[in-house]
Image (tube, helix red, strand yellow):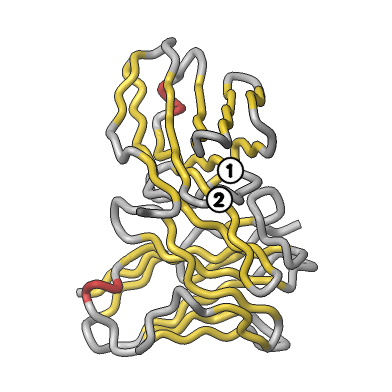
Amino acid sequence: NAGVMQNPRHLVRRRGQEARLRCSPMKGHSHVYWYRQLPEEGLKFMVYLQKENIIDESGMPKERFSAEFPKEGPSILRIQQVVRGDSAAYFCASSPMRDGTGNTIYFGEGSWLTVV
Amino acid sequence: QKEVEQNSGPLSVPEGAIASLNCTYSDRGSQSFFWYRQYSGKSPELIMFIYSNGDKEDGRFTAQLNKASQYVSLLIRDSQPSDSATYLCAVPRIIQGAQKLVFGQGTRLTINP
């Protein structure tokens, strides 16, 4: 049973470019969470999605960031016009149920974005 | 006040000693608590969770919860160099009927051979 798959694992973008991060949840999981981890900091919740629905985006910056989880295919976190402050590790997690707590949530290996 | 607070460290402990990691939380209604271990450049890995006041032991790890003091800790006995990592405390929050995790900033632990 494959785990949560994220790609790319490492991404370098110049300021002003777009970054697209993809997350395929574990088989049978329909709940996806995105977290961001800035250097030397803990993980910060960004957005929670179910298939075709954004349930909670309270942690998403108001501009340039968007997320989707289509009926078919992976969840995508999109960052437009990247700036150096977007450099971080972005972790996706999936859960088989609404209760995405520690013992039912599974993290991917992360995508490391570097903006130069 | 942050929802979940940890000392960022670094915490340095000699091999074989007990490492003690602490976490405080602000919401008295919190019911469950999770400890994650994160190696550099890797994703967080769940190592312990605790719901009830008192101690919960799993191998060399013991989680301690004191709800009255809003305090949860993680003890690592017989520390090994492989325990060197950042340890993250996390508390679930319910949003629109679904739970998300709120993390502390993490404590960096180094075990010295």
Image height of A76 relative to B98, above or below: below
Do tags 2 and 1 sit on the same chain? yes
Q: What residue is rendered at 43% in x and 57% in y?
A: A43
Q: Are marks 2 and 1 in contact (CB under 8 Å)?
A: yes
Q: What residue is rendered at 64% in x and 56% in y?
A: A106
Return the disc, 2 or 1, that comes first in the chain's sequence.
1
Residue B17 lies left or right of residue A108; in this view the side is left
Which residue corresponds to mark 1?
A: B34
Query: Residue A55's spot in the image, x, y percent?
Result: 63, 80
Q: Comparing marks 2 and 1, which lies closer to the viewer?
A: 2
Query: Residue B85's spot in the image, x, y percent?
Result: 40, 36
**Which residue type does callout 2 highlight?**
Val
Image quarter in which the N terminus of chain A is found: bottom right
Q: Chain for mark 2?
A: B
Image height of B20 relative to B14, above or below: below
Residue A92 lies left or right of residue B18; in this view the side is right
Residue B31 lies left or right of residue A14; in this view the side is right
Query: Which type of secondary structure does the marked residue at label 2 adopt?
Result: strand
Query: Residue A32's spot in the image, x, y percent?
Result: 63, 71
Q: What is the C-alpha distance between the residues marked 2 and 1?
A: 6 Å
Question: In this orientation, which residue lies closer to the viewer: B6 or B60?
Answer: B6
* Mark 1 nearby-residue class (10 Å; few <14, some 14–19, many ≥20): many
Image quarter in which the C terminus of chain A is found: bottom left
**Which residue type does callout 1 highlight?**
Phe
Which residue corresponds to mark 2?
A: B91
* Mark 2 nearby-residue class (10 Å; few <14, some 14–19, many ≥20): many
Quadrant hosting residue B86: top left
